[in-house]
Image (tube, rainbow, N blue to C red):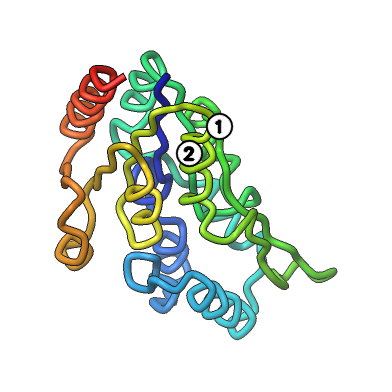
Amino acid sequence: MQIVCLDLEGVLVPEIWIAFAQRTGIAEFSRTTRDEPDYDKLMQYRLALLRKHGLKLADIQAVIAGMAPMDGARDFLDDLRARFQVIILSDTFYEFADPLMQQLGRPTLFCHRLLTDDQGFVAEYRLRQPNQKFHAVNALKGLNYQVIAAGDSYNDTGMLGAADAGFFIHPPAGIVAQFPQFQVNHSYAELKASIAGAAERLAAQG
């Protein structure tokens, strides 16, 4: 039995915080997990920025409401789901993801939660569990699944390393240099072929 795990932002949808930075004109919001491997440090930085500029959860959600998946993402995902069970493992938040999940046909999503105060400001974030992508892959392997995974960033490398086969899709060059063990794909067609090849190899191994 095989299952495919995919990251969300940068793989199937644009980076939400980059879109927010562009909409608000506040360049500091464009910092993502591609730039900062310490997720807690990154999120504390974002929460402080939101407070500094008086921006609330509703302001972020308004930007997300106007976003769409990347070109070809829905077709890629539909094709993948016709052949495999697919789980999206993301470090986004349920409070962000719903409009994008609707456009992607509501794939299964494991991510985190945001807590707001009585004024609507984001007060804190709650991880589903630390290093959740890595733990999710290992849990699936413990259920006798062969896991194939794909992502684009620092916070995906634990997942890719834990999987039976792990791939990058259009990652930054700096991350590729640090993690040369993961094959790089530059398009959905390439990634689809890589996943198919890995599935065949893993099936042959039993």
Callout 2 secondary element:
strand
Q: Residue at x 59, y 82 (%)?
A: 48
Residue furthest to the right: 118
Residue furthest to the top: 82
Quarter containing the N terminus: top left
Residue furthest to the front: 206
Residue 172, image x, y percentages: 21, 61
Amino acid marked by disc 1: Thr
Amino acid marked by disc 2: Ile
Quarter containing the C terminus: top left
Nearest to the observer: residue 154 or residue 125: 154
Q: Is residue 38 above or below residue 138?
A: below
Dot 2 and dot 1 residues touching (CB under 8 Å) = yes
Q: Quadrant of residue 155?
A: bottom left
**How many badges with numbers are in the image?**
2
Q: Residue at x 34, y 56 (%)?
A: 157
Which of the labelled discs sits on residue 202, or is there none?
none
Q: Residue at x 52, y 35 (%)?
A: 142
Badge 1: residue crowd in 10 Å (few <14, some 14–19, many ≥20): few
Asked whether, in this view, residue 122 is left or right of residue 40, the answer is: right
Q: Which residue is mark 2?
A: 88
Which of the labelled discs sits on residue 108, or is there none?
1
Q: Earlier in the sequence, mark 2 or mark 1?
A: 2
Q: Is residue 52 above or below residue 1?
A: below
State how far apart marks 2 and 1 are (Cα): 6 Å
Q: Is residue 75 above or below residue 52?
A: above
Q: Residue at x 21, y 24 (%)?
A: 201
